[in-house]
Amino acid sequence: MKTFTNLIREVREPGLCRRCGACVTFCSAINYGALEMGEDGLPRFADPEKCIECGLCYLFCPVMGEMEEQARKKALWEPPLGNIIEANVARARDASVRELATDGGVVTAILLRLFDEGRIDGAVVSRQKGLFRREAWLATSRKEIIEAAGSRFDASRGMVLYSRRYSTFVPTIKALGDQVRMGLRNVAVVGAPEQIKTIRKMQVLGVVPTDSIHCLLGLFCSGSWEFGEKGRAELERLGGFVWEEVAAINVRERLHVLTCDGETRSLDLDALDFIRRHACGYCADYGAEYADISFGGLGSDEGWTTVVTRTPLGRAIFADAKKHVLQTCPRDQAPDKVSRALEALRGRSQWKREAAEVVAKDGSGQTTVAV
């Protein structure tokens, strides 16, 4: 049986770790205490003597191909874009939510509706922590859900500072451990594709704390970036902006930088390969295909969200939200707008899948890591 020692050798040392935090979260939730997250965001041994070598961390690691078919069955996955029950273009009815949130505020509106109706008692999100920095967070009140809205960085919802380097990836799963300590029984999780996929694997295995998860809300993701001072300087040069003057950043088909004076600078995502996280090159999932509902601004007009319901639970949640807290695009415009959104999703998903297949092949053309 392969254990965390194997993950160090096969995943962490080659630079493939997604920093999802699942291995540490599970180990901490059952009080083993063998693992911890390092300052660089990578998992490591806290106390090797406490590791019982159960091998579960290896099974649900998103880099490994273990439990792949079972996770797909759990998520009702089917090619080429995952299961799609329905696609919509929507936004929050509440103007104050739209003002705070990203791409129409649909995720925030749904979380608030679930919380107000008592269907969830918490939500794993990310919140602002200093200038352009965010952290994984378990919100347990309406106020905290609203506080977590916005900060339009990439699909991973913001930046985390590891040592002297910035990263747009936030280890959402890390906050799952808090739900065990707080005794919460119904939690919604908002996360990037690889985080959602990892949780599906954990659900298949029936391990804590996934027994307390109500729903999985996935975010479209082109990848995450990580850079230091040199990377920041190069971004400023390419985009023609000064970092201190940036008001918000959002990713759709391109990277859009909004400055404090109201101007927008746009960069092609392919131009950002020099700061893209190495591990992201192996991720083939753009549309959060294992989620109950997937969201993103891609393919929709500014201020609107592309929404894909993927499971019966996701369809029920979205149907209720449409009645009470969401506005969908006018019926006479819906077919064209939804079709455009799905076409954009199809194109971006194919781009990410093909890019991952190229990266995952060694010189002999053989796939070396499951994608």
Image (cartoon, helix red, strand yellow):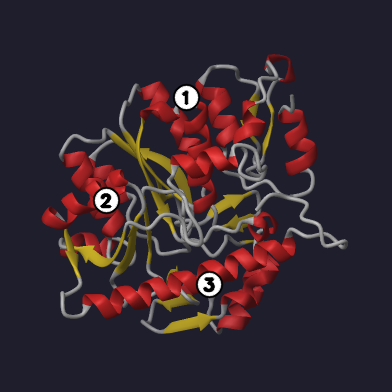
Q: Secondary structure at mark 3?
A: helix
Q: How many C-alpha atoms fall within 10 Å of the one at disc 3: few (<14), some, or many (≥20)?
A: some
Residue 323 lies, in percent from the top left, at 12, 55
Q: Secondary structure at mark 1?
A: loop
Residue 173 lies, in percent from the top left, at 49, 39
Q: Amino acid at mark 1?
A: Val
Q: Which residue is mark 1?
A: 208
Q: How many C-alpha atoms fall within 10 Å of the one at disc 1: few (<14), some, or many (≥20)?
A: some
Q: Earlier in the sequence, mark 1 or mark 2?
A: 1
Task: Identify the residue at horizontal 29%, vertical 77% (top origin).
Answer: 337
Q: Nearer the viewer, mark 2 or mark 3?
A: 2
Q: Amino acid at mark 2?
A: Arg
Q: Amino acid at mark 3?
A: Trp
Q: Which residue is mark 2?
A: 315
Image check: 116 left or right of 356? left
Task: Identify the residue at horizontal 44%, vertical 30% (top origin).
Answer: 210
Image check: 287 left or right of 107? right
Residue 172 visible here: no
Tell me how far mark 2 sits from mark 3, CA to CA.
40 Å
Q: Nearer the viewer, mark 1 or mark 2?
A: 2
In the rendered view, tell whether residue 129 sits above or below residue 118: below
Q: Which residue is mark 3?
A: 243
Task: Identify the residue at horizontal 45%, vertical 39% (top origin).
Answer: 74
Q: Secondary structure at mark 2?
A: helix
Residue 174 lies, in percent from the top left, at 51, 37
